[in-house]
Image (cartoon, rainbow, N blue to C red):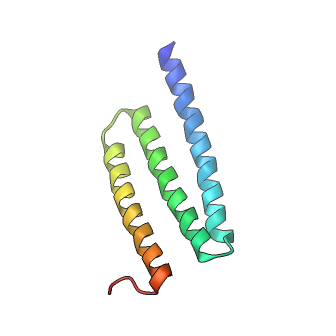
Amino acid sequence: MSEAVLFWSVLMAQMLLGLAMFCAAWRILRGPRAQDRVVGLDALYVNGMMLLLCFGIRSGTDLYFEAALVIALLGFVGTAALAKFLMRGEVIE
């Protein structure tokens, strides 16, 4: 019983995360301002990270968890760099 519940809940989470990634991609493509696009990119990498974690739970391997950690680190650095660029117009001072 618990394996079936886990299977269906992870499958539902993957489908909803895919829908959330589509919405974030739509915000990136149709955002009226650059700040909206940065927020959409931030949401896209967070949802992608969560989708990898769901794949890791489903398959039981540690590789997906390490890839999600790398995506989280690179996404945070990218968001910080884009925010600094939008505020001042330069990344490296």
- When asked about the image quadrant of residue 62, the answer is top left
Up the image or down, 11 lies above or below 42; here it is: above
Where is residue 86? Give x, y as percent: 50, 80
Q: Is residue 29 above or below residue 67?
A: below
Residue at the image position 48 percent from the left and 57 percent from the top: 45
Does 81 appear above or below 88?
above
Specify whether 52 is left or right of 32.
left
Residue 28 percent coordinates (x, y): 61, 67
In which quadrant of the rendered view does residue 15 lie? top right
- How many numbered marks, from 0 up? 0
Residue 89, above or below 21: below
**Residue found at x 69% / y 70%:** 30
- Residue farthest along the front direction in this orientation: 87
State the residue in front, 84 or 58. Answer: 84
Residue 21, position in %: x, y?
A: 59, 54
4 sits left or right of 30 in the view: left
Instruction: Please state, as top left, top right, bottom left or bottom right, where the C terminus lies in the image.
Output: bottom left
In this rendered view, identify the residue nearer to me: 8 or 37.
37
What residue is rendered at 59% in x and 48% in y?
A: 18
What x and y, as percent, mark residue 54? 46, 39
Residue at the location (34% across, 44% down)?
Answer: 65
Q: Residue 7 vs residue 84: left or right?
A: right
